Amino acid sequence: MADPEIATPESLRQSLDVRSGEQPFRVPKTAELVARDLRSKIVRGELKDGDTLPSEGELVTRYSVSRPTLREALRILESEALLTVTRGSRGGPRVHLPDPRLAARHFGLVLQSRSTTLADIFGARLLIEPSCVHLVASTARRTAPALLNEIIEQERATLVAKDDGEHARASTRFHRSLIELTKNGPLILLMSMLTHIYERHISTAALASNLQRFDAASRTRGLKAHEKLVGLIEAGDGDAAETFWRKHLEGIDKLIRENYAVDREIDLLE
């Protein structure tokens, strides 16, 4: 008999396959078709961020629909944060590009429904960020050091000023830049969503406040770790950079586990 605790290939596939639980085929309503066309124009750049849609009368004529149907289509897009509808002589539906924060919220709600913990979120970072470092060392060793060294100088200035909060924010920028320097769009979006969820629960300011018991020497060691990583990136040593950064993040993980209840489930409904 199969062990119920061990996921079978089929059960694992179903847990990952976003198509599982498909609904029966349904003919879209006219309002949904209008919303789909406008959504396509926004995503493909035919409508720019901040553009105002044509008048209601013009849209009714263009799509050959009734005013209530058009308004329903606009409400659909407004619920997706792709439009803001304002009233008045200078009002109208204003276009917005897809917002990563909205994606992060929906992504977070899916994770919450699966009992994801803060430890799981940081664990994902621990798996992904060192691989990003390897990629940066392999592809951006000539351009990355200048940007990263600029952030390191900001960190050094916060140590002199003894500004723990600003030091934490500068350190966060360093980590975020390691992801952005990969220039991999899907990876950047994924990590930004994970970071957004994580910071909803542990803000950089709270982290800095809780780590005040650690002396300046501890923060200086963190700064030196950043400097060493930049040196490895500049040398193009992807393997060494990845190994070093994974060990560094494991140290951070241990520190956070000692100061936060990271095994509690995330809650984005608070």
Image: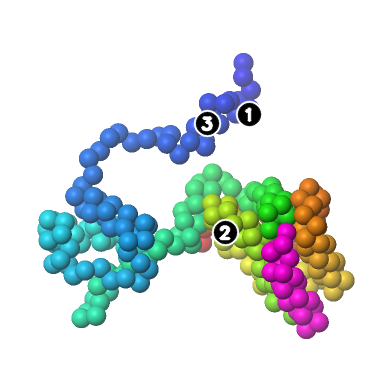
Kindly tell me whether residue 221 is visible in this rendering: yes
Q: Position of residue 62 (x, y in %)?
A: 15, 59
Q: Residues within 10 Å of mark 2 (few under 14, many from 20)?
A: some
Residue located at (59% from left, 57% from top): 183
Q: Position of residue 23 (x, y in %)?
A: 33, 36
Q: In the rendered structure, does residue 156 fall within the stretch colored magenta? A: yes
Tell me the residue that label 2 is attached to: 192
Question: In the image, which residues are magenta?
Answer: 141-161
Task: Tell me the amino acid under the disc marked 2.
Answer: Ser
Question: Which secondary structure lies at badge 3?
Answer: helix
Q: Position of residue 185 (x, y in %)?
A: 54, 55
Tell me the residue that label 3 is attached to: 13
Q: Residues within 10 Å of mark 3 (few under 14, many from 20)?
A: few
- Mark 3 vs mark 1, foreground winner is 3
- Location of residue 114 (image quadrant): top right
- Mark 2 vs mark 1, foreground winner is 2
Instruction: Give residue 238's mark.
Output: none
Task: Tell me the amino acid under the disc marked 1.
Answer: Glu
Task: Tell me the amino acid under the disc marked 3.
Answer: Arg
- The answer to whether residue 198 is left or right of residue 217 is left
Mark 2 or mark 1: whose residue is earlier in sequence:
1
Residue located at (55% from left, 31% from top): 12
